[in-house]
Amino acid sequence: MEHLASSDRYNDMKYRKCGQSGLHLPVLSLGLWHNFGGVDNQQNAAKILHRAFDAGISHFDLANNYGPPPGSAEENFGIILSRDFKRYRDEMIISTKAGYLMWPGPYGEWGSRKYILASLDQSLKRMGLDYVDIFYSHRYDPETPLDETMGALHHAVQQGKALYAGISNYPAEKTEEAVKILRNLGTNCLIHQEKYSLFQRTADQGLSKVLMKEGVGCIAFSPLAQGLLTDRYITGIPTNSRAGKPHGFLRKEQITPEIIKKVNALNNLAADYGISLAELALNWVKSQSFITSVLVGVSTPEQLDKNLHVCKMTDFGDEILEKINSVLL
């Protein structure tokens, strides 16, 4: 049954201009990396999408390999989109990516023109779409000339199969080079997707400056360090958590005593300000000047509701930022 979206869905969400483009993204975007694959409950997945859209989240982030199994997140999203959201397609930003392993043989991953364009065609077919709004090169390929990979993104835009081009997981110097190649071809690089959180701050080592200088937006993924920056792991590893699942990317061995000590200190600091640890972690990312949107992944609509509180929070000032740094550094 088609979903009837809330009439006040844009009232509370905040939107930010993405780089120097005319496109605005919500400060929170929904990632489908987890919880939308073939192993997951599809009724729950649909409820999450309904709640997100009703709250003003207009950006839905996928990739060819999301699942598991790879491709199943796009397939399931396509089913829900066709059934529940067909009338709202023009109110949505749908993104996908190509870069990681999708099929066997030499043409099933990385950054060749052959793989990039074939993968996009497959993604469109799985989702039942004529185009995606943003198409990313999912990772830098050191074995393929950057001209070739960026040329494939440009071609996808020229074909009308993508409205914007983006890159993900590129180091700072290759980001700068990629942006210039695309610009010379006549397609601006809209956005860079980077892993960024209180526990992962590689972007501070040069990438953020490149993005701001070149007018490229940034969307942060894993802002909660896949759940570490919540209260879920303070007393142990829940069986239904990412670290508790055999197919998850967060491994039990990553949750070290040193990490738990920092998590507890941050949790206490958050309590001093009357907020949750997750709210502290998300708002810290949102407060960074180079960040356009924060990508969240959730397992339930209720978990999404908790994350949405951040949209109403003001960006952090110097006092709390200094206290956070004192815990981490």
Image: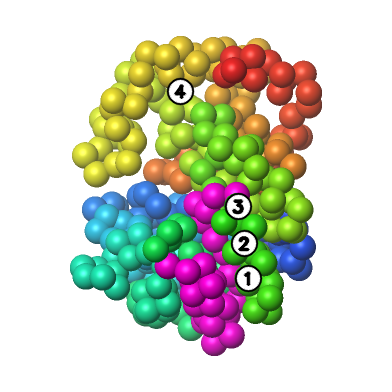
Q: Which residues are magenta?
A: 144-172
The residue at the point 21 percent across, 70 percent down is 105
Residue 11, percent across and down?
73, 53
Q: Is residue 292 above or below residue 126?
A: above
Residue occupied by mark 2? 177
The answer to whether the residue labelled 1 contacts the one labelled 2, judged by CB atoms less than 8 Å apart, is: yes
Residue occupied by mark 3? 173
Residue occupied by mark 4? 231
Residue occupied by mark 1? 181
User: Dividing the picture into quarters, in which one does residue 120 lie?
Assistant: bottom left
- Marks 1/2: CA–CA distance: 6 Å
Q: Secondary structure at mark 1?
A: helix
Q: Nearer the viewer, mark 4 or mark 2?
A: 2
The answer to whether the residue labelled 2 contacts the one labelled 3, judged by CB atoms less than 8 Å apart, is: yes
The answer to whether the residue labelled 1 contacts the one labelled 3, judged by CB atoms less than 8 Å apart, is: no
Give the class, few, some or many, for how many residues have Cα within 10 Å of label 3's Cα (few <14, many ≥20): few
- Marks 2/3: CA–CA distance: 6 Å
Q: Nearer the viewer, residue 256 or 274?
A: 256
Q: Is residue 64 above or below residue 226?
A: below
- Say whether residue 296 is visible: no
- Marks 4/2: CA–CA distance: 40 Å
